[in-house]
Image (cartoon, rainbow, N blue to C red):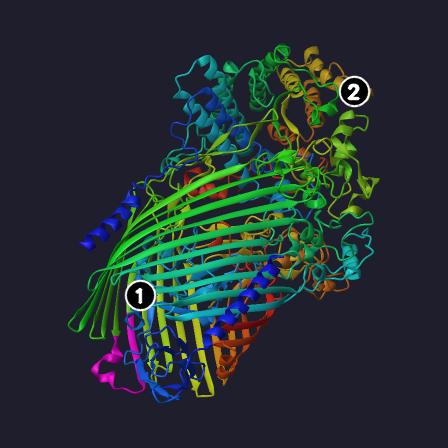
Amino acid sequence: MRNLKYLSIFLALIAIVACSDLEEVPVGRLSPDGLVQSPADVQTLINGAIGNMATERYWGRKLSLPIMLRSDMVSIGDLGTPGRRQEVNNFSMGADNGMVTALWPKAYEVIAGTNEAIASAATLDADPAQLDPVTAQAHFFRAYTYYHLVRLFGDIPYLDAPVLDVDAALTISKTSAAEVYSNIIADLEEAKLNLPATQPSRALPSKGTAAAYLASVYLTLGDYQKAYDEAKYVIDNEGEFGLVLEADYQDLFNSGVKSNEPLLTLDFNGFSDGDTGRDYAPALTGIRANERGNIGGGWSVAVPTINVYNAWDGRDYRKAVSLDTTGIFNGVEEPFTKFPDFDSRNIQSAYIAKYTRFVGATGTGNGRASSLDYNLMRYAEVLLIAAEALNEINPGTIEAEGYVNRVRERARNGNGSDFPANVTSGMSQADFRDMVLEERRWELAFEFKRWYDIKRRQLGMEAFGLGGLEPQPSFDPARDYLFPLPFDELDRNPNLAPNNPGY
Amino acid sequence: MLKNKMKNWLKTLVTGIFLLTISVGYGQQKTVTGTIVSNDDGIGIPGVNIVEKGTQNGTSSDFDGNYSINVAEDAVLIFSYIGYVSQERSVTGSSSMNITLEVDVNALEEVVVVGYGTTKKSDITGSVSSVKSEELAAFPVLSAEQALQGRAAGVAVQSNNGGEPGAPINISIRGNTSIGSSSAALVVVDGFVGGALPQPTDIESIEILKDASATAIYGSRGANGVIMVTTKKGKKGKMVVEINSTYATQNTTERIELLNANQFAAYRQAINPAYVQGGTETDWQDLIYRTGNISNHQLSFSGGSENINYYVSGNYFNQKGGVINSGFERFSFLSNVDVQATERLKLGFNAYANRGNKNGIQSQAGSGGSGGGDVISTAYRFAPDTPIQDANGVNTTNPVGDQFDNPFAIATESVDETKTDEYRANFYADYELLKGLNFKTTFGFSTENQTRGRFQPSTLIGQAGTQGGIASIASVKGTNILSENYLTYNAELGKGNLTLLAGYSYQKDRTERYSTGAQGFLSNSLSYYALNAGSDIQTPFSSLSEREIVSLFGRLNYEYDDRYLLTFTARRDGASNFAKNNKYAFFPSGAIGWRISNEGFLKDNKTLSNLKLRASYGVTGNPSITPYQSLANFQPIYANVGDQTVGAVVPDLIANPDLKWESSYQTNLGLDIGFANDRITATFDYYSIDTKDLILRNSGLPEYAGLLSNPFQNVGEINNTGFEITLSTKNVLNEDFSWTTDLNWSTNQVEVVQLIDGQDIFLDSSPGSFLQDETHLLREGEPVGVFWGYEYRGVNQGTPEAGTAGYAETGAGDELFTDLNGDDVITGDDRKIIGDPNPDWIAGLNNNFRYKNFDMNVFFQASVGGDIYSYTFLELASGESNATPEVLNAWTPTNTNTDVPSAAVREKRITDRFVYDGSYVRLKNLSLGYNLPVDVVDKIGFQGIRLSLSGQNLLTFTDFPGTDPEAQYRSQGSQDSNVNRGFDYGSYPNIRSYTLSVNLKF
């Protein structure tokens, strides 16, 4: 009897705690199932893609730095900097280069976010007037990201839907660059169709942004008529799109100024969460031990060769905005010839100033996590695209000269000098072509454009030859216009072999 | 303040109890004295319990077997001691009574705690090591984990951060059975699974369950071994009060020799001729190191009556670390009460509470930036010609290399406090249903709350100057509920003995975390207590994780005729964290034992007193799936559009509904042998553990899938094979002098057997500021975590040498590396395995000497054959910091016969130049104790007074040139802790202590 009494107490104890079906109910985690219910939720995924671009492994450093270093405008300052950076700069990188293996996955993470947004938008029963402009952003950012990848790597895996299964993902092969471009164009067309004429922020693409990128893509493909048409479309609608050339060139690189020139920006606001929201350009391009700007100096990694300083006309206001020729050390302003005296990792050259002069609030030292908004596409480039394309289809037009002159006029405004003068009328088609490319070099200096121009126009032998601004004896045109695909990606999926020639 | 209060309280208490004891002393009628000896060797037996029958009056014999007790004229005394047959003697007519206790024929019947019960040591079929309280309390240590170092074969104990007060300590049993998950042993305290270890002085014994036969009863959590802790219980008899007080002074054992101001300036000028020497001579190591101390006080009350036993203790531990501004303080309480409620019902209650305050300094700098927050490494790096503050009273930052604050400023001005509260309450009831059939139920609850607050004021220019001060708070709250119910049945079946166990267990744990921070404070006086005053609030974080485990378990032990032993164990675990398609797991094991010495042909052998063969095989698990790991997930991230923070998520994980726990298949072969009535005993164990279904992130998922994280997958296999020897000898056993030796020695070979598609997994453990990607790797056929880097060939003499190439050769005096693949350039392909951090063997050697009332303990501990990679020396050779005197011999055009490259800023490449032999033998403890003679002690009303003087880490024999071969850089807290071994960087140096202890018992 007593046994029974105690047993019942114990059994009651067991019963209290013993019932569990072991199902996991994760609170505080986002399960993909049923997450997206409205266009606003689709925007959350697109915001994720934007956030993913503003990370160290992408625009923060791993994408932005290689594109700069690869050009003839930027080289290595501190020779103690990691080999992976030097290898990108001097054309000796292998398929295990740490810059490439970092930017590749991040690019695809951006794409996966847009794919997820497009796929989940398709499941929504929402008003197209509300949903389509949002989905169009996803199409735009997918195109934008593939556009970088196809220019850097050529043939690449192309995915336009979320990956749900590892084995299925491993069956795919590379898509040819031509096909990737046609997919990019399709996405941009979709974006152009549904995006609004203006957005609350230049960080979001508008109809004009999609058209400007179409112009850029067609220019890259050598389809000059279409490039011109798209650029012209933007120019003709500059009022509707709210586009104005910024009066003072310096204001384009000032975190305190909200400019109406950009068609697309990548925003930083002095805040970062780990590597997200953190740019490294101020640190990478800054002068070590420099007291100017009070950010603790930079790291002297990405520095133009002295040839850039020498080749750039001193009367050009854009030179003064783009380059720092002095620094402040121990409270005294010193010329660049003395930079190494204050830190042996500095070199005797003018330093990039676009990312160090007006960085605004910063999250961490050396200007990292600045408040800069990077101009990914600005109206001046659209004008130059129009000029370059028009010259190819119809050389010698006043119209083409006019586009370049608008850019030059704004440059002159800065310091009231008469340089750069308007374009000399009646240039030959070839001279005009070279002139526009040079104009792009200076106007868009250090804005991640020059390497793509060199590649697009196959200017490597010239740019990296003995007469170029940055002689690089290792440059091999058969190999170096493309980056290697990461070696481990080829190991995972042998269908991706062979790697690009020479790697 | 608190310490003083505590002291006063103690004083009052001691005095009070002292007076009480004296007053009790009156009223007794007779004193009986005598010596108790053993019948086999005639030597006095210490610690024999002497109780006046029918009373609570009792005492115990001293170290020589002498006793003295005041009793009634007609009293009967009971003499009892474990391993001996008890005796009852009437004291009538004699005041002197010498007793000879007979050795119990079952002298081996030492009882050992195993999962859900106890067993006679002689009946054990698995591999179990025992560590007794004397060993755990031999010298003051921070925690019981530390006290285990060197005490048991196959058990490796290592602090994660040298001698840092409050540093976490890793215990691994028989190597690391996992790669991606924790290899930490399961801790079971008084039956509570996952309990925090109490203070060493509160522990009666620790049993370490090592093979599958012993651990399978813990199923999916048994693969890493189990540490069974039994806390002290009260014994029947009058109350015993014990006071232990310890005071130790501590100093760092080693420093790194660095350049002085003049040498430094010359070195800098060789790199940069414009360098201007600063005007001071500062030895940063001198500034940050100090003589620290530990004071540790413990007071315990224990005793019991016919039906109730109790043990209550309080402990206060206070350590001032060997680095300024670092310390650790702890209060803890333990209470054990056992009640024989009725003849058949036994109840017990066990409670434990502990508060720890860690006052940290930053060391072992992590990733990111200049690594400038680390007091230890900056003390090496910082320019010695620079003062603490400049002429304007502003803290200096390093004049060369990255801008970082000086170590003195960091140590004194930054705040890093961790407060931890732990509580555990555990109730049990044991009811005898029938003779031999018992039902036991336990219900326990534990909680752990930890808050870490950090603040870096804006006066630390490098760290927080531009941000205007940085503050953060992070909090973790964990709760754990355990309910277990089991039946035990024991029956004699003729010559056989059968024990059956069957039970059910339910456990739920829950962890809540949150953290937040802010920057930009008006004042540096706010510390981290006014985050709202910051101008820039950082992203807050919170998370919840829950786990449930339901289990059925059972065990069968059969012993026949004291010769044949058989054990079967099984557990079935169901766990919420297991993936959808694999919610339940089954873990069986079996073992046999043969006590050959009890066979007829050996039974009468006088030399061989014990010979037993053991063999076991079984499967145990590693519950390495953390909650929700098998589910698909989106991850919220920070995003900013138009300078506005916006809600943003990114695809993170795809689901793996087939994910399983990691399983370890372990074979164990053991031999126990004893000679000369077990004056010499030895245990040999061989084991092989195959851990399969290792959970790794599926690196086979292509990156173009675009997921933030690779999904978890069961891939991979590793093997740990080892051999363990434990040897105990009683070398001399005389009345006045005794000498015993305990040796344990073990090897463990770990090999990666299988990885995903045979692909190497490259890992990086370097400080973030080094900007390196790969420092060590996992490769099939190799040990876990071997170092990966270039082979250094010396200095370029200006003329190219065959087999060398690449840009490293750009000038005379530069570093040369071997061009392994012969392609004339030095690239990542020219790297190879350059070191192995896994030791060949570890050992502990303990000698106890006793001469009359004096005793001495000499304890050596060793680890031999593991390599260390020193990021410290790599950094000091990189030209961006101060340097070791090695650079005085740097290559110059006139000093070419050297392998030290010319003074220059160099990339921090991982090369074999900085791989060192990390072998060491350390005199862990040397102590001298004195027990006051029993008659003296008795006169003043005490049962025992002991004084001891000891030194820890007095001697270290090693070739490692860094501060401490035991150092481990970032092995805790990083996901790959098991594979991230043998790295040294900015570790808190180990500590040499001199300790005075007083032990009072009354």
* Whether residue A423 is situated above or below residue B831 in the rendered picture: above
When the figure is inspected, residue B526 is found, relative to residue A174, above or below; the finding is below
Magenta-tinted stretch: B595-614
Q: Secondary structure at mark 1?
A: strand
The front one of B528 and B73 is: B73
- Residue bearing mark 1: B118
Marked residue chain, label 2: A
* Amino acid on which the number 1 mark rests in the picture: Thr
Q: Quadrant of residue B462?
A: top right
* Circle 2: element type: helix
Question: What x and y, as percent, mark residue B859?
Answer: 51, 74
Residue B172 counted in the magenta span: no
**Residue furthest toward the left?**
B494
Which quadrant does the N terminus of chain B fall into?
Answer: bottom right
* Residue B612 part of the magenta-drawn span: yes
Whether B513 is drawn above or below B743: the answer is: above
Q: Residue at x 68, y 18 (%)?
A: A429
* Identity of the residue furthest to the front in this view: B27
- Which residue has dot 2 on it? A412
